[in-house]
Amino acid sequence: MNTPKIHESEYRFCLILWEHEPVTTVELVKLCQQQLEWKRTTTYTVIKRLSERGVLQNEDGVITSLISKEDAQASEIEELVEKRFGGSLPSFLAAFTRHQKLSEKELDEVQQMIDHIRKGTTS
């Protein structure tokens, strides 16, 4: 399945949705006013756009996501790796770790992921 593109401001909106779903449009408008300083009309416009693209659904004024946060993040990373690193995950990781120091705990977590992948049991 192709994950629809979620732009930056839409992603910030989706973070609110993912945290509170299912959520009514009235409550979502209030949350977006508080957290994003959006007007009511902006929230309704984003709901309509994301609904049309298959990111969320509005059923009788109750909003739920059709795309998980994890799927949206994975799609963004895949696009970034493809566009900027020619599809090479090792090149991406090398660039990332060149300027981002990983703690021992993070290194252990990455090693565990690699071990799971090698065993064929991704989690």
Image (tube, rainbow, N blue to C red):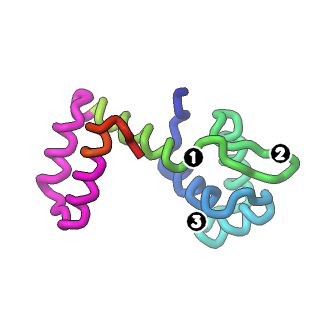
Q: Amino acid at mark 2?
A: Glu
Name the spot of residue 52 as percent of width and height, x first. Answer: 69, 34
Would you name the residue on which mark 2 appears?
59
Decide: marks 3, 2 in contact (CB < 8 A)?
A: no
Q: Earlier in the sequence, mark 3 or mark 1?
A: 3
Q: Quadrant of residue 27?
A: bottom right
Specify the farthest residue to the right. Answer: 60
Q: Residues within 10 Å of mark 1 (few under 14, many from 20)?
A: some
Q: Which residue is mark 3?
A: 36
Mark 3 element type: helix
Residue name at image x 21 percent, y 41 percent: 92
Q: Nearer the viewer, mark 2 or mark 1?
A: 1
Please check the rendered image and state whether residue 85 is part of the magenta-colored stretch, yes or no: yes
* Residue 3 on image: x %, y %: 53, 33
Magenta span contains residue 102: yes
Q: Quick one: label 2 or label 1, which is nearer the N terminus?
A: 2
The reply, left or right, for residue 103 in relation to residue 58 is left
Horizontally, residue 19 falls left or right of residue 87, namely: right
Q: Which residues are magenta?
A: 84-113
- Which class describes the residues within 10 Å of circle 3: few (<14), some (14-19), or many (20+)? some
* Residue at the (25%, 45%) spot, across then down: 115
Residue kind at label 3, given as amino acid type: Leu
Could you tell me residue 77's position as x and y percent?
Answer: 36, 41
Q: Which residue is mark 1?
A: 68
> Splitting the image into 4 quarters, where does residue 21 fall?
bottom right
Asked if the residue at tag 1 contacts the one at tag 2, i.e. Cβ–Cβ closer than 8 Å, the answer is: no
Q: How far apart are the alpha carbons under marks 3 and 1?
A: 21 Å
Residue 79 location, quadrant: top left
Q: Residue at x 32, y 38 (%)?
A: 80
> How packed is label 2: few (under 14 Cα within 10 Å), some, or many (20 or more)?
few
Q: Nearer the viewer, residue 1 or 56?
A: 1
